[in-house]
Amino acid sequence: MTDTQKKAYKEALQKLQEELGTKNPMAVPTLKKIVVNIGVKNAVADKKNMEVAQEVLATITGQKPRINKAKKSISSFKLREGDKIGLTVTLRGNRMHEFFYKLVNVVLPRIKDFRGVSNKAFDVQGNYTLGLSEYSVFPEVDTGKIERVLGMEMTIVTTAKNKEEGVALLRVLGMPFKK
């Protein structure tokens, strides 16, 4: 995180503190972590899909993803317990702030016909979940090498106590919500 971004983040938190009327600066909600998930569709049929998705997720987040395995066998999906079916990355600290900045300022504006993200995807604790239908909107991804388009899900975990505080935090940090 650059000095300019740190300064902007601190200013945004001070603005949020005034907006919420919180006296203690430690009680102001902040970003805690960002969890990025990719479910690999045909990982069982072709192991190459898992390797490609793993490489792409590592380039997007700057961190090696953890491989998720199936907990149950499901015969209709031809899935056995222990099969590799997904990838997860948990970002904290500077990587989290860099990823959030890139998501808000670079990735979301690149989405075709983008009019803002929904503000209905908050849970009771003020955490926000955002899904993308394809990961090719990230600038690091070489679209020429993509064989199969996969979606991804990002959960932004905050220290907010409720939904209203979570909305206020992400709005102050620059998340483009629908009007």
Image (spheres, rainbow, N blue to C red):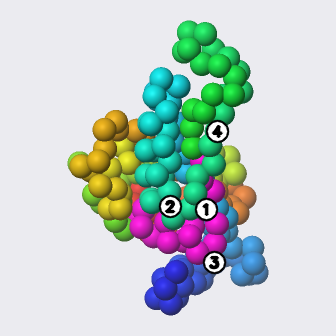
* Secondary structure state at the residue bearing disc 1: strand
Say whether residue 112 is magenta. Answer: no
Percent x, y of residue 33: 64, 61
Percent x, y of residue 98: 50, 72
Mark 1–mark 2 CB contact (< 8 Å)? yes
Of labels 4 and 2, earlier in sequence is 2
The answer for how far apart the CA atoms under marks 1 and 4 are is 16 Å
In the picture of the structure, the residue carrying the numbered disc 3 is 17
Seen from the viewer's position, the closer of residues 158 and 172 is 158
* Secondary structure state at the residue bearing disc 4: strand
State whether residue 82 is above or below residue 19.
above
Residues packed near mark 1 inside 10 Å, few (<14), some (14 to 19) or many (20 plus): many
In the picture of the structure, the residue carrying the numbered disc 1 is 91
- Residue 18: image quadrant is bottom right
Residue found 75% across the figure and 73% down from its top: 27
Seen from the viewer's position, the closer of residues 118 and 154 is 154
Residue 29 visible in image: yes
Residues packed near mark 4 inside 10 Å, few (<14), some (14 to 19) or many (20 plus): some
